[in-house]
Amino acid sequence: MAQSVERAILAQTRRGLRTLLAVPAARAAGLKRVEDLEISGAAGPLRARYYEAQDAPPQPLIVFFHGGGFVCGDIDTHDSVCSWLAKCSHGRVLSVGYRLAPETPFPGQLHDARAACAWAFQNAHLFGAESNRIALAGDSAGAYLAATMALELNRATPGAVALQALLYPLIHVQDTMWADEELRNFRFLGRVACIYIAKSLGAEALPSLLDIDLAAAPPTIVAGGGPLDPVRADVRAFVHALGAAGVRVTEKKYPALMHGGLNFTAYSKTATSALQDVGALVHAEFGG
């Protein structure tokens, strides 16, 4: 009975987020192309959406993984985020869905992300993008997938991932680390969320990005929030660890931004301003 109630609450949460965030009017105007696709996943087709800015040069294709704690979100809830990122980077973004927990336990999400990256390398030329490099991006749990894939790909082929843009990235779900700061930095809500995420994934041992060698990470853009962003302490530690590993990092901080706030471009000037900043940084990184 308890499990069926949990599933019903999760289903309602997913529907509510889609109603709140999948707002067509929030999509950035002036894009040259927006196209829905199906790409190859690890266990079947994955939904994807391609965005292209006007006069986009042949730079790396940005593969974006949505957030939502691995249990919510899709390419529709993150439509506005990806459209603004494409427009303001003057580039190309491929937003990729992946199987969610608890229906698909970890590491199914990583398997789908790996398959999506392979598809992007094989097909980037079809969009006019560079075929030998990609960029990876994501928010929250999606940023975890992006960072993990960037390390994996660059260890195998140095320079294959030219850049990663991580928006308030989820760094770990280890309860002991969250408990240490439960009453600081708004961590009590974050701890509750991460306990649920770990339970849904079936993966309390989800590898922490603070426990692995980061030397293969590409140049990194990190954007995070303030007191209403419970991952901010972990992001600080991650940025420090990247720097200590010799990785070039550009960090942008937005004190008024809450975790997940970049999805609210229909309602928040902070969200659109932050995405404009990140897009401009990506554009500059690729020689814009």
Image (tube, rainbow, N blue to C red):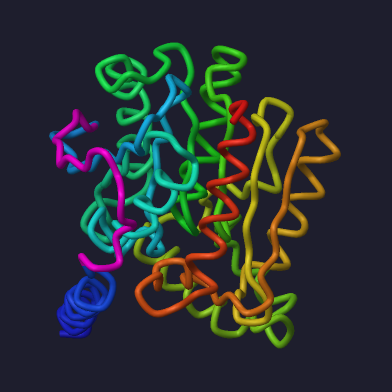
Q: Residue furthest bottom?
A: 183
**What is the x, y in percent for residue 116?**
31, 31
Total marks placed:
0
**What is the x, y in percent for residue 248?**
77, 35
Task: Tell me what residue is drawn at x 56 percent, y 36 percent.
Answer: 283
Residue 228: in magenta span: no
Question: Is 43 located above or below residue 209 in the figure?
Answer: above
Task: Tell me what residue is drawn at x 18 percent, y 43 percent.
Answer: 47
Task: Tell me what residue is drawn at x 29 percent, y 41 percent.
Answer: 51
**What is the x, y in percent for residue 127?**
28, 22
Residue 35: in magenta span: yes
Q: Is residue 207 left or right of residue 34?
A: right
Looking at the picture, tell me which residue is in the foreground, 36 or 10. Answer: 36
Looking at the picture, tell me which residue is in the foreground, 138 or 201. Answer: 138
Query: Looking at the rendering, which quadrant does residue 1 occupy?
Result: bottom left
- Say which quadrant the C terminus sits in: top right
Query: Looking at the rendering, which quadrant does residue 252 occupy?
Result: bottom right
**What is the x, y in percent for residue 211?**
70, 44
Question: Is 9 located above or below residue 97 in the figure?
Answer: below
Q: Is residue 117 left or right of residue 256?
A: left
Numbered range of the magenta stretch: 24-41
Looking at the picture, tell me which residue is in the foreground, 166 or 153. Answer: 166
Q: Is residue 95 left or right of residue 161?
A: left
Q: Is residue 47 left or right of residue 77?
A: left
Query: Looking at the rendering, which quadrant does residue 86 occupy?
Result: top left
Q: Residue furthest right?
A: 244
